[in-house]
Amino acid sequence: MFHKFKEDAPFFGRGAAKYVILDQLRDKPKHGYEIIKNIEDRCHGFYSPSAGSVYPTLQMLEDLGYARSIQAEGKRVYEITAEGQAYLGEKKKEVAGIHEKIAAFFKGGHHGEMHEFGHEMRDFVRTIAHGMHAIRGDPEKLKRVREAVARARKEIVEIIGQ
């Protein structure tokens, strides 16, 4: 949920990745990690695209002539081309729609709480993923972790009221 540009992500629909990334490049050249962090910050930590989705999109944008990569301070950075600026200009409505979805999602002044929630979810998933290696050979610990996750899910369902 927090790592790929998916159609069911809270702000991004099909094909939105290219608009979001080009929009990131509009003000200055950036390296891939900087793009990822900027998108994560813009989404208050609730959403963070993976390198596995950002870099292929950057490559596609290069192939289309909308972006180019350059070396700067020993890093590969990407900048928008004139063609990319023109394309982004043609897609103003789509880009504005993405910004509107992000603003609407965080409407109500809960930005900090949503930001913290996003980080907690990411850390929760990482903890479980990394912990699986440690408990792989211990069925009792695996069962306890699974039960803890089930209890957490049940409590969240009760809080949400679904």
Image (spheres, rainbow, N blue to C red):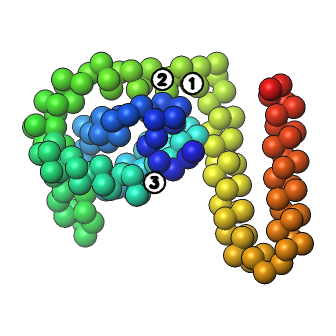
In the image, residue 33 sits, relative to residue 119, either above or below, namely: below
| Type of amino acid under label 2 | Lys
Q: Are marks 2 and 1 in contact (CB under 8 Å)?
A: yes
Write the residue at 14% across / 45% down.
64
State whether residue 34 appears in this view: no
Q: Which residue is mark 1?
A: 105
Q: Position of residue 90 (x, y in %)?
A: 18, 23
The quarter in which the C terminus is drawn is top right
Q: Which residue is mark 2?
A: 101
Secondary element at image label 1? helix
Q: Which residue is mark 3?
A: 50
Separation of marks 1 and 3 at Cα, in angstroms:
21 Å
Specify whether 87 is left or right of 39: left
Q: Are marks 2 and 3 in contact (CB under 8 Å)?
A: no
| Type of amino acid under label 3 | Ser
> Earlier along the polypeptide chain: callout 1 or callout 3?
3
